[in-house]
């Protein structure tokens, strides 16, 4: 009697719309009810409860895995109505790990064998969704039978399920493949399209295995006028053509026919895509496809416009002319309101970039970046940056222009790509000597603008600019203004680690100025008072600007500020003295000269594999586990309190293991908890952000290896002098003639070597994927072999027969197949070897070639 | 186009009851499927999603394995993306390396997720096809129909797609199959609802 008072699904839905309880409490109430009802012995009560539950699960995301067994019970009902509800619940909630999955096999088998075609279809649908390896194995005979069913309704669904079965249980291919191929020649268009769909998916997984069927596909391609089928066929052929290029010649013509004939845009688009992706060697076809793409581009329909651009981007790598021809439309699409279209257009424009037009395209893009929304603006910036810096600035000829472009980018209001621009500014400074004057000019312009200091996204750029202008101060027009810019009050807005770089740059400028001042004094005895005054001014400005920082909280800032002030204090007297008496032995003079020497030593970029060139010092054991190190160091770290971590702990960390060991032996250590020491290490890293910033040169240190390595430049020259690397040199000479002129000596070669390592890493990836593929192939070959065993006789013989005597009655064929099957059973081993070889070198029947 | 624009006027109740198919602008036909009677193949649709303009889920169908958690995440993510797109933009969204093809009919968004290399226009056609079949079945279908007959929308979808591929492109055939199944159910219900059956149950 329960079911008389039970709420139906409709009641539930209505109740849900009227309820005032709030969604979650209403759902939990309904669930309670369902839990009670679903335990009923009466199947219709149970099924209604299950129905309600699956509604809640589908729409409101309620978990229904607990009802798996109840779903099974409902499915076992003899009533179609219940079955349908049960199967729906199962397809919705079952997955590979569902524990009751084992119990469903028999029920499915029963329903697959049912006389009621709708029950069969329910079971098939269920199998298509939840099929596991076991289910696929156990039920493949049933599916095989259904593939030959007289009802096309069932046969169609069985075909749809086959793929899942193949996927889970490859051995089923042996059994079912033959029937599938038979269905390719059916006159029933419904089944034909189902089969083509299956082959489409098979071909996309493993094109070679479908290659022998090419003649059949070709026939359908020519004959069929069903657009759904044709789209699938085109997909098959684009896969097949990628493994058998000769096929392209044959299919290009009918594809062009379809392209000319049809008005259905989806088919046209599929033709276009097939041609540009797989038949790109066939000029006539490509031309026609590009013409069609142009039609798409001028349409008002945003879908077609987007797809047109998409097709162009597929064509771009091989047929750049197609993109160039449509340049106008592409540029126009940049201002489209649809972000998808804009992005696609941007990618296309970037594909067009070459040495000659890079400045023009960048100009266009910068204009768009100024106008567009933040998201797209940054998309533009990042793609320009990445294309221009590709392969060590391969396409950049005029670095002065490029550096100015970087400066401009920094001034785009929405720019958020500071880190990348920062990296490139420094990178170019180190790599391209000739670009340095311009780099300093651009940096100066950035530094002097107080407005930029307010934008935190630009801080990285400013830090790069300050480093550049300090490092290459010799190109600065007016050091005084530069210093003023570096110590302006608004630099308060910078984070401490960047401020430290600012101060250090001030230091460099100061040293440079003093040095030139002193040397001028030496050479010309008559010193003008204006020079004296200007240098005094400079010193005063620095003193005033830096003085407040000597009390800064950040140790890095504080220490650098104190360094500068100390240096000034020492030099000030001498500056004054200098004017009066010519004393070559003045201390400041010597110190300045020394500092100048230190600073003028050039920093170069570091090859990514430079670290490998460093040989491990004798007696050094590179401990793999740094946890040990922490324990060992614990003792020394203990007295160091968090704020005063500066140089001392750096030494502690950089000391080679060996030394630490010695000390450890001397002192029986009570170690700090590892947590604390690691946090100290992290803090140290933070403090010395500047140290990490300037280049990758510190990377080896940060990995916990000793500091006693030769300085970066020695490494660079070491690599340079390496005579064993002729490749590197050859490459450098060939690929970047322009940059050779720009770069001199070390950097350029290292540049190329870096580029090379980049490429190497790329090829590494490729070879990895190739390995994976080949590993997969081994698996597949096994599968394929089995597959071919089942059908090789059929495929091969059928081809032969169909080639020789095309109009053949089906009876005769069937007989042949049966014969073939039998022989294959007998001579399995022989076939196996045949098949193995054929899978490597698939033969295409003459018909096609 | 005018009709499409008029839909943007927020009048909640009206929209709930407006027929979905009414809102069809004259479709620029990507695929002339009217007489190409039957088709199948792998659209390789990963899931189907029906979301109302208010972000309420009306139907979900998953052809690839997703856990319940992932499902709700996907729905949240996608409805956020799709509902915010303007009316004149293209019907495709790139999402996690897949493409989601969507189309708005009155207050409902029909979304299907496919692989990047699948044919977007074809999927648009499948969506349209589905709507037309629903329209034929319910007789000028509207959102309320789908709310109250959510299971029927499922059954129809099951006849249209199998394992994430379109299996049936003839509207007539789908209608015939569905009505045949309905009849079976009705017959069973009548039997179950008959007084004699209830008495038999009760006693």
Image (cartoon, coloured by chain):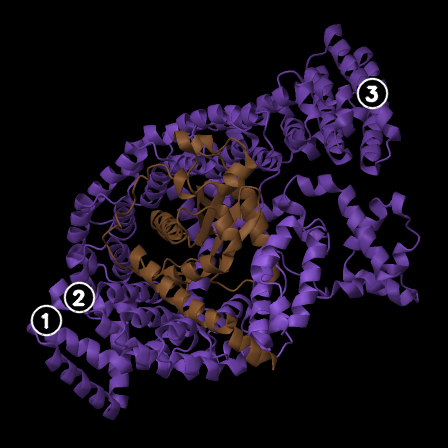
Chain colours: A purple, B brown
Q: Above or below — where is B123 with respect to A673?
A: above
Whether residue A640 is visible: yes
Which residue is rendered at x = 44% and y = 67% of the image? Answer: B186
Q: Quadrant of residue A703?
A: bottom right
Mark earlier in primary sequence (3, 2): 2
Q: Which residue is mark 2?
A: A215
Residue A128 at x, y percent in the picture: 42, 70
> On the picture, is A404 further left or further right than A116?
right
Q: Secondary structure at mark 1?
A: helix
Chain of the residue where label 2 is placed in the rendered structure: A
Residue A259 at x, y percent in the picture: 20, 46
- In space, the residues marked 1 and 2 are separated at their CA atoms by 9 Å
Circles 1 and 2 on the same subunit:
yes
Q: Above or below — where is A621 with respect to A70?
A: above
Chain of the residue where label 1 is placed in the rendered structure: A
Q: Which residue is mark 3?
A: A543
Whether residue A613 is visible: no
Decide which of A98, A268 is in the foreground and name it.
Answer: A98
Which residue is rendered at x = 55% and y = 68% of the image? Answer: A93
Q: Quadrant of residue A4?
A: bottom right
Q: Which residue is mark 1?
A: A803
Mark earlier in primary sequence (3, 1): 3
Decide which of B161, A515 is in the foreground and name it.
Answer: B161
How crowded pointer 1 is (Cα within 10 Å; few <14, some 14-19, many 20+) is rated as: some
Q: Nearer the viewer, mark 3 or mark 1?
A: 1
């Amino acid at each position: 009697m329960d079911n008389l008072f039970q709420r139906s699904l409709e009641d539930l839905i209505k109740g849900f719309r009227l309820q005032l309880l709030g969604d979650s409490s209403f759902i939990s109430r309904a669930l309670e009810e369902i839990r009670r009802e679903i335990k009923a012995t009466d199947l219709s009560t149970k099924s209604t409860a299950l129905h309600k539950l699956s509604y809640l699960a589908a729409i409101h995301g309620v978990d229904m895995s607990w009802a798996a067994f109840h779903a099974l019970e409902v499915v076992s009902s003899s009533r179609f109505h219940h079955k349908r509800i049960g199967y729906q619940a199962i397809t919705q909630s079952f997955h590979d790990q569902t524990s009751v999955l084992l119990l469903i096999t028999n029920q499915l088998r029963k329903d697959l064998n049912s006389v009621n075609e709708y029950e069969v279809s329910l079971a098939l649908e269920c199998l298509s969704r939840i099929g596991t390896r076991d289910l696929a194995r156990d039920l493949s005979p049933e599916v095989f039978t259904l593939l030959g069913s007289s009802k096309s309704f069932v046969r169609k669904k069985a075909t749809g399920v086959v793929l899942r079965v193949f996927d889970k249980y490859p051995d089923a291919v042996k059994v079912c493949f033959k029937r599938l191929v038979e269905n390719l020649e059916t006159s029933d268009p419904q089944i034909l399209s189902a089969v083509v769909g299956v082959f489409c998916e098979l071909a996309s997984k493993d094109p070679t295995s479908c290659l022998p069927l090419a003649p059949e596909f070709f026939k359908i391609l020519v004959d069929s006028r069903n657009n759904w089928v044709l789209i699938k066929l085109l997909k098959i052929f684009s896969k097949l053509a990628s493994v058998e290029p000769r096929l392209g010649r044959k299919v290009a013509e009918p594809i062009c026919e379809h392209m000319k004939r049809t008005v259905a845009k989806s088919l046209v688009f599929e033709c276009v895509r097939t041609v540009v992706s797989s038949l790109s060697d066939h000029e006539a076809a490509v031309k026609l496809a590009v013409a069609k793409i142009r039609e798409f581009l001028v349409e008002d329909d945003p879908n077609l416009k987007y797809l047109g651009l998409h097709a162009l981007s597929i064509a771009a790598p091989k047929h750049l002319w197609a993109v160039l021809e449509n340049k106008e439309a592409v540029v126009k699409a940049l201002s489209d309101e649809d972000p998808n279209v804009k992005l696609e257009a941007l990618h296309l424009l970037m594909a067009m970039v070459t040495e000659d037009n890079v400045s023009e395209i960048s100009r266009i893009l910068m204009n768009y970046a100024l106008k567009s929304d933040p998201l797209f603006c940054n998309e533009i910036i990042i793609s320009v940056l990445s294309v221009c810096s590709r392969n060590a600035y391969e396409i950049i000829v005029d670095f002065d222009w490029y550096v100015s472009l970087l400066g401009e980018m920094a001034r785009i209001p929405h720019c958020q790509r500071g880190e990348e621009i920062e990296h490139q500014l420094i990178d170019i400074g180190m790599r391209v000597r000739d670009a340095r004057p311009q780099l300093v000019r651009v940096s100066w312009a950035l530094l002097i603008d107080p407005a930029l200091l307010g934008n935190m996204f630009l801080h990285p750029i400013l830090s790069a600019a300050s480093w550049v202008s300090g490092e290459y101060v010799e190109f600065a027009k007016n050091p005084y203004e530069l210093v003023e810019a570096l110590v302006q009050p608004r630099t308060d807005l910078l984070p401490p680690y960047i401020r430290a770089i600012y101060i250090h740059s001030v230091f460099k400028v100061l040293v440079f100025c003093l040095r030139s001042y002193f040397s001028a004094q030496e050479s010309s005895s008559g010193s003008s008072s204006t020079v004296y005054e200007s240098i005094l001014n400079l010193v005063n400005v620095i003193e005033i600007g830096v003085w407040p920082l000597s009390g800064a909280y950040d140790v890095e800032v504080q220490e650098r500020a104190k360094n500068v002030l100390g240096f000034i204090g020492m030099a000030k007297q001498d500056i004054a003295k200098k004017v009066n008496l010519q004393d070559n032995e003045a201390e400041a003079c010597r110190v300045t000269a020394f500092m100048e020497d230190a600073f003028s030593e050039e920093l170069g970029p570091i090859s990514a594999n430079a670290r490998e060139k460093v040989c491990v010092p004798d007696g050094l054991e590179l401990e793999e586990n740094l946890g040990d190190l922490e324990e060992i160091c614990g003792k020394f770290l203990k007295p160091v309190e968090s704020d005063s971590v500066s140089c001392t702990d750096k030494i502690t960390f950089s000391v080679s293991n060996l030394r630490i060991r010695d000390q450890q032996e001397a002192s029986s250590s009570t170690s700090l908890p590892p947590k604390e020491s690691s946090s100290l290490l992290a803090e140290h890293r933070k403090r010395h952000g500047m140290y990490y910033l300037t280049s990758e040169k510190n990377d080896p240190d940060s990995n916990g290896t000793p500091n006693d390595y030769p300085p970066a430049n020695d490494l660079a020259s070491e690599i340079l002098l390496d005579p064993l690397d002729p490749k590197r040199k050859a490459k450098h000479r060939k690929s970047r003639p322009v940059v050779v002129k720009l770069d001199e000596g070390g950097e350029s070669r290292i540049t190329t070597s870096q580029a090379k390592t980049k490429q190497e890493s790329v090829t590494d990836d490729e070879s990895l994927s190739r390995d994976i593929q080949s590993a997969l192939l081994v698996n597949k070959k096994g599968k394929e072999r089995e597959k071919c065993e089942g059908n090789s006789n059929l495929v091969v013989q059928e081809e032969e027969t169909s080639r020789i005597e095309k109009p053949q009655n089906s009876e005769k064929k069937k007989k042949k197949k049966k014969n073939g099957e039998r022989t294959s059973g007998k001579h399995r081993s022989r076939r196996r070897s045949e098949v193995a070889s054929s899978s490597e070198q698939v033969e295409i029947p003459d018909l096609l070639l | 186009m005018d009709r499409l624009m008029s839909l943007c006027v927020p009048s909640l109740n009206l929209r709930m009851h407006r027929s979905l198919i009414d809102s069809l602008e004259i479709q620029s036909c990507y695929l002339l499927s009217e007489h190409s009677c039957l088709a199948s193949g792998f659209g390789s649709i990963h899931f189907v999603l029906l979301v109302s303009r208010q972000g309420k889920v009306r139907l979900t169908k998953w052809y690839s394995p997703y856990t319940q958690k992932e499902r709700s995440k996907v729905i949240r993510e996608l409805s956020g993306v799709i509902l915010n797109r303007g009316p004149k933009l293209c019907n495709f969204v790139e999402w996690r390396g897949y493409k989601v093809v969507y189309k708005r009919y009155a207050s409902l968004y029909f979304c299907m997720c496919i692989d990047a290399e699948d044919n977007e226009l074809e999927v648009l056609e499948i969506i349209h096809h589905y709507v037309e079949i629903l329209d034929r079945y319910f007789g000028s279908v509207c959102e309320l129909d789908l709310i109250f007959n959510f299971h029927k929308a499922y059954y129809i979808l099951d006849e249209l797609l199998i394992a994430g591929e379109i299996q049936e492109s003839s509207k007539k055939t789908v209608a015939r199959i569905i009505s045949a199944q309905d009849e079976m159910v009705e017959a069973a219900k009548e039997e179950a609802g008959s007084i004699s059956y209830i008495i038999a149950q009760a006693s």
